[in-house]
Image (spheres, rainbow, N blue to C red):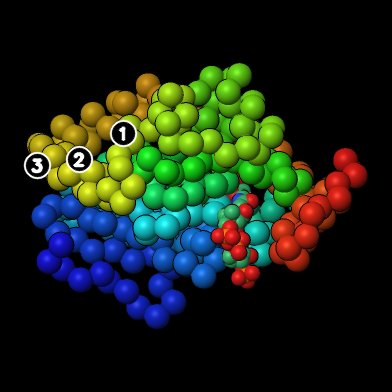
């Protein structure tokens, strides 16, 4: 990379461009790249800016060398109610990722949990380091995935394996992710960005319009009628913020103690 990372104080997402590709990095290491609504919104804005940039043909999305993301920002959500989520529909910021035209590839080093796993699955490919870990641990917070996990994991992995990981919250390895078909390639530790960049550069050298339309067509095959499922999931997710278990699960996480769920 010859250009320098565009980074300002407090920027939750930074990026650099070189050789026809952009490398976009989640940048909230102090909270393990927790995905605040502002961060997702900024990420979508950057990817749309890159769509309009003729020097760029494809992008790589990374969280850095140690982790991709620990998921949605629990602190931001802990005190929220079902009514306020219904009123503001905060998770609709995720929808803007679906209209990104140019391919973007997630390069996962370390863990991609909850919304982090969902963000990787919302991208066009996933290159994972061999020690990467994926998971949908929302159940341990008294909630469920709310940014596509129940829909995209099930479409890729099938009902039986998806049920296991969503209902137990157990993490799964890069090898298991590859077996389930949610990973494009598994590479040695530390090589995910390099391999994702290699693929992005190959794509960037192809005829641009053909790439855009081919991506659209593959998404139609993989995500046809996905929207209804995503809205159903989102609505159930919001409704869990009317439960005591959601309050208990998130407070327990933030206070670093074991939750005591009551099923209410
Ligand atoms: N949201 C907000 N803050 C988070 C966070 C999150 N998802 N994950 C970690 N943090 C914060 C911690 O609170 C901690 O803050 P303090 O320094 O102020 O105490 C800091 O990041 C470091 O966290 P840990 O000490 O826990 O770091 P670790 O490296 O030991 O563990 C981890 C990493 C295993 C990922 C652990 O942090 C963890 O389990 N995080 C939560 C994972 C999770 O439950 N994700 C699902 C979120 S809900 C969701 O994503 C809904 C959806 O569908 C969109």
For marks 3 and 1, give the one nearer the viewer. Answer: 1
* Pick the front one: 18 or 171: 171
Q: Residues within 10 Å of mark 2 (few under 14, many from 20)?
A: some
Residue placed most toward the observer, 63 or 94: 63
Q: Report crowding for label 1: few under 14, some 14 to 19, many 20 or more residues within 10 A (C-alpha).
A: many
Residue at image point 40% right, 72% down? 11
Q: Earlier in the sequence, mark 2 or mark 1?
A: 1
| Residue corresponding to mark 2 | 199
For disc 3, the neighbor class at 10 Å (few under 14, some 14 to 19, many from 20) is: some
Report x, y in % for residue 5.
Answer: 25, 69
Q: Residue furthest bottom?
A: 9
CA gap, disc 3 to disc 1? 20 Å
Q: For the N terminus, which image quadrant?
A: bottom left
Asked if the residues shown at circle 2 and circle 1 are in contact, with their CB atoms under 8 angstroms apart, the answer is: yes
Q: Secondary structure at mark 2?
A: helix
- Residue 84, percent from left and from top: 73, 57
Q: Nearer the viewer, residue 184 or 233?
A: 184
Q: Residue at x 50, y 23 (%)?
A: 157
Q: Which mark is residue 85?
A: none
The residue pinned by badge 3 equals 205
Residue pictured at 22% horizontal, 49% vertical: 194
Residue 186, placed above or below residue 75: above
Q: What is the C-alpha distance between the residues marked 3 and 2?
A: 10 Å
Residue 35 in view here? yes
| Percent x, y of residue 154 | 55, 25
């Amino acid at each position: 990379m010859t250009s320098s990372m565009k980074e300002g104080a407090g920027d939750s997402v930074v990026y650099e461009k070189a050789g026809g590709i952009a490398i976009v990095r989640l940048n909230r290491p102090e909270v393990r790249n927790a995905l605040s609504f502002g961060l997702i919104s900024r990420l979508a804005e950057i990817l749309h800016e890159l769509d309009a940039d003729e020097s760029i043909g494809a992008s790589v999305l990374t969280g850095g060398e140690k982790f991709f993301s620990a998921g949605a920002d629990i602190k931001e959500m802990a005190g929220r109610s079902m009514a306020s989520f219904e009123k503001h529909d905060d998770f609709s910021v995720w929808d803007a990722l679906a209209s990104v035209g140019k391919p973007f590839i997630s390069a996962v080093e370390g863990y991609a949990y909850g919304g982090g796993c969902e963000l990787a699955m919302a991208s066009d490919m996933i290159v994972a380091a061999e020690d990467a870990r994926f998971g949908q641990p929302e159940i341990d917070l008294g909630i469920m995935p709310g940014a596509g996990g129940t829909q995209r994991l099930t479409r890729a992995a099938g009902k039986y394996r998806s049920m296991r990981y969503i209902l137990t919250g157990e993490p799964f390895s890069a090898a298991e992710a590859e077996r389930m078909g949610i990973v494009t390639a598994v590479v040695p530790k530390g090589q995910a960005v390099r391999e994702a960049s290699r693929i992005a550069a190959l794509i960037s050298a192809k005829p641009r319009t053909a790439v855009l339309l081919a991506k659209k067509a593959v998404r139609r095959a993989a995500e046809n009628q996905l929207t209804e499922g995503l809205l159903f999931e989102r609505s159930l997710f919001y409704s869990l913020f009317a439960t005591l278990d959601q309050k208990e699960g998130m407070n327990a996480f933030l206070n670093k103690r074991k939750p005591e769920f009551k099923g209410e």
